[in-house]
Image: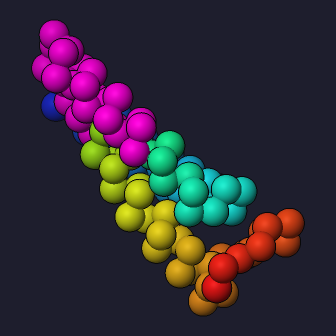
Amino acid sequence: MYGLLIGLITFVIIGAFHPLVIKGEYYCGVKIWWAFLAAGIVAMALAVIADSVLWQAVWGVLSFSSLWSIHEVFEQRERVRKGWFPKNPRRKYPF
């Protein structure tokens, strides 16, 4: 039972981080990476101190999804530069 639940939660977390990266880069630029780092560290600490395997898995997936999003936000900047995603017209771009 826990395996299916962990799989579903993982699917939802990864699905939620995709638009978070896109919107984060759109509104904040790559400066948003600090928020992903902080979220990853907090979730990692929660995974270590959680009592149940279910919560350890959920916090672990959330932590590594947050940390992977740091990489993705810089990749998103490149996707915007290539024209694959829209630029925020109210923000100056360094490229």
Residues rendered magenta in the picture: 37-62
Residue 40 visible at all: yes
Q: Which colouring convention does the figure follow?
A: rainbow
Q: Does the magenta segment cover residue 42? A: yes
- Give residue 63's position: percent from left, percent from top: 31, 39
- Give residue 48's position: percent from left, percent from top: 16, 23
- Give residue 20's position: percent from left, percent from top: 56, 50
Residue 1 visible at all: no
Residue projecting furthest to the right:
90
Q: Residue at x 79, y 67 (%)?
A: 91
Relative placement, left or right, of 26 versus 44 is: right
Q: Residue at x 72, y 57 (%)?
A: 27
Looking at the image, residue 28 lies above or below residue 71: above
Q: Residue at x 53, y 81 (%)?
A: 78
Q: Quadrant of residue 54?
A: top left
Relative placement, left or right, of 74 versus 46 is: right
Q: Magenta segment, principal secondary structure?
A: helix
